[in-house]
Amino acid sequence: MAEIRLDNVVKKFGNVTAINNVSFEIEDREFLVMLGPSGCGKTTTLRSIAGLEHPQEGDIFIGPRRVNTLAPADRDIAFVFQFYALYPHLSVQNNIAFPLKAAKVEPTEIKKRVINVAQMLRIEHILDRKPSVLSGGEMQRVAIGRSMVRRPKAFLMDEPMSNLDAKLRVDMRSELKSLQQQLGTTTVYVTHDQVEAMSMADRIAIMDKGQLQQIGKPTDVYNWPKNLFVAGFMGNPAMNLLPCCFESASQQLKIEHTNFAIKLTRNHLDLIRPSISENLVFGIRPEHISLSTTSIASGLKAKVHLVEPLGSANIVDIVLGQVSADKFVLLRVRTHPSIVPKSGETVWIQIDPKKIHIFDRSTTLVLSETA
């Protein structure tokens, strides 16, 4: 097992910077998920750790060794690709055993390791089958088994569940997390799926445009986003982010293109006053807004635009104002399934002041997390 460290890594493809001065450390036995949209640089970062890409600047360490100049085969890592890359002419048993045979491991040891891995992955019954007759979940297990059998210092996984159906992905998330905890192998896992990241990771590294935006525990990056990108990317539905300005006379946030003003706590006010920018962004997650179909004295009155029933909850779009004839200022609210207002109905909402986030519009950085 080993820790992995990146120091100021830069990778360019021509004039395009895929990784822009990225630095972070992955602890020994940690499960780190690299999360971000397509083209953000997460896979290029993973491939750089593996030695499949070569950064122009910076250093990469696996354990105490600087590995920049080492070939992939000499880094003692195992890579699980998005496409499982199984040998179609080999049985499951021989696919799993292939890296050990290439390393000239003794046949008795190979058999022992293959059986052990097959038992852990619950695929003993398919060892004699060829990949062409396997399901997606079975092929994924074989690909993981081929990596496990080598007993590497680290696993690198590039969206290994993206080809599975929704139900199988749910099952495999828990299986893979349990397996990683059982093996205790340092794991770097790339995905664009935030549910995978939140449910499996010890920590999440969020990337955008080749830069590391935030790294931390899943609950930390969700509850305390450091900038507008993280706030808008994490969560489904995402955080409500509305342009606003601070009114010093009323000590409130005025939401642009609306008649709504948000009262702030003392902690929020203390954070806003030193700010030189009056152009701010108000943020609140849908689950931190309560909605009532009956009048509330302290509530904000608004109309329902659209309701999305999800079974376990409803997502209600509330109209706060109008920018143009066809563009509304909307606030998304997550409600209990029993609360099902109709489109056009008047409702009253209350915002939890302790859950408000305020961002500087010019820098995109957070001014306050929670007061």
Image (cartoon, rainbow, N blue to C red):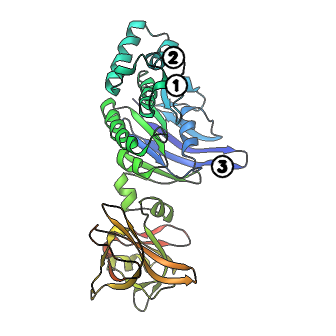
> How busy is the neighbourhood of tag 3: few (under 14 within 10 Å), some, or many (20 plus)?
some
Question: How far is the residue under mark 3 from the one under mark 1?
Answer: 32 Å
Q: Nearer the viewer, mark 2 or mark 3?
A: 2
Relative to residue 176, is residue 146 drawn left or right? right
Mark 2 or mark 3: which comes first in sequence?
Answer: 3
Residue designated by label 1:
86
Question: How far is the residue under mark 1 from the one under mark 2?
Answer: 8 Å
> How busy is the neighbourhood of tag 1: few (under 14 within 10 Å), some, or many (20 plus)?
some
Which disc, if any, is residue 141? none
Residue designated by label 3:
17
Name the spot of residue 286 as percent of width and height, x first: 37, 69
Q: Is the residue 148 above or below the residue 136 in the image?
A: above
Check disc 3 and give the amino acid type. Answer: Thr
Residue designated by label 2:
90
> How busy is the neighbourhood of tag 2: few (under 14 within 10 Å), some, or many (20 plus)?
some
Helix, strand or loop at label 2? It is: loop
Helix, strand or loop at label 1? It is: loop
Quadrant for the C terminus, please: bottom left
Name the spot of residue 113 as percent of width and height, x first: 37, 16
Q: Residue furthest bottom?
A: 249
Question: How far is the residue under mark 2 from the one under mark 3?
Answer: 40 Å
Q: How many numbered marks are there?
A: 3
Q: Give the residue at x 59% y 54%.
A: 209
Mark 3 or mark 1: which comes first in sequence?
Answer: 3
Look at the numbered discs 1 and 2 and tell me whether their residues touch, using CB distance below 8 Å: yes
